[in-house]
Amino acid sequence: MSTLCYWLSALAARLADDKPYSIPTACHPSVLSDSSSHPPPAPGLLLDSALQLIQQSGRELPSTEDPSWLQGVIDALCDLSSRDALTGLANRRQFELALSREIDRVARAGEPALLLMVDVDHFKHVNDTHGHHAGDEVLKAVALRLTECVRPMDTLARFGGEEFAMILPNCSPTFGQTVAERVRQKVELQAIPMALSLSISVTISLGGAFAPQWVRSSAALWIERADRQLYRAKAEGRNRACMEHAQISLVSAEEKRLLFGTSNVQNEA
């Protein structure tokens, strides 16, 4: 129990600060399964901060009499640690995990994947003219419109500030520009209500890049390539989508065998 307390306290503290966290060595599952390990002493199960965060988020927990109560606390904290507090989208931490998984999948399966970086145009002007509360409402409204454009298999995240990111697995280069244009138009056509019967409209700029197939790239490089197209969209006048020309890598069956250790029998099967 002291080990669990130590881990939950660390998680709640990191979550409150919105900082990356790591599981202490003494709390790693491989250590928890070892009865000979001795976790750091803890005075008790201090969950006040964790429960306050969960209550603030509006999530409901099982009754304290329910054996699954503690698991519910852990699940709620894990969910909160992966979400952006303002928009409810995946946060930067969750986005980077999803991006790493997608890079691995593309390298092994050779299937296409598109990364879109999305930026709200003239967002500083919105804040300066209407106030930061209005800016928050704009971000939430844009997030909602972007959510309407993604599939269950996609990842939509708030990358930071007024910038969002979308990971679109199995998105063919043939349809990349069309997908980006649909997203852009979805936001452009929306009127965002403000106080005193006022409404405003905003536009977005998008930059897209496809992951190189059969190549194990890096998250930083993929983001940089998409960002480069986003900067081009901004430089060309904003409210547009710019896409990097997709490079298709052709890998022979023999190269796949050497890369992934697949046998001829497996390929024929």
Image: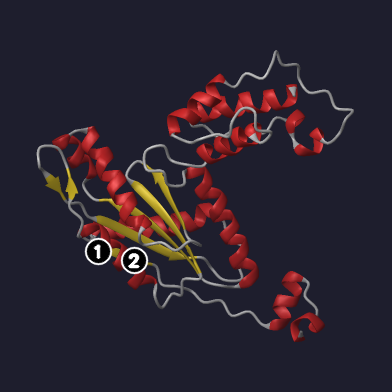
Pinpoint residue 143: horizontal percent, then vertical percent. 34, 50
Of helix, strand and loop, which one carries label 2?
helix
The one nearer the camera, 107 or 19, is 19
**What residue is shown at x 68% (from left), y 23% (from top)?**
5
Coloring scheme of the render?
secondary structure
Q: Which residue is mark 2?
A: 180
Question: Would you call the spot at circle 1 few (<14 residues within 10 Å), some (14-19), or many (20 or more)?
Answer: some
* Point 75% across, 24% down: residue: 1
Compared to residue 235, the image places residue 212 above or below, namely below
Q: Is residue 46 something one can see in this rendering?
A: yes
In the displayed structure, would residue 14 be above or below residue 211? Answer: above
Q: Which of the 4 image quarters holds residue 194?
A: top left
Residue 129 has which mark?
Answer: none
Please tell me which of labels 1 and 2 falls first in the chain: 2
Which quadrant would residue 111 be assigned to in this image? bottom right
State which quadrant residue 140 falls in: top left
Tell me, yes or no, if residue 17 can be seen here. Answer: no
Task: Count neighbours of disc 2 (C-alpha within 10 A) and say few if under 14, some if 14 to 19, many if 20 or more.
Answer: many
Q: Amino acid at mark 1?
A: Gln
The residue positioned farthest toward the left in the image shown: 197
Of 68 and 73, nearer the camera is 68
Q: Which residue is mark 1?
A: 185
Q: Residue at x 42, y 47 (%)?
A: 89
Q: What percent of the width, then of the height, locates residue 235?
A: 24, 57
Q: Amino acid at mark 2?
A: Ala
Location of residue 219 in the rendering, given as x and y in whole percent from the top left corner: 54, 54
Of circles 1 and 2, the one toward us is 1
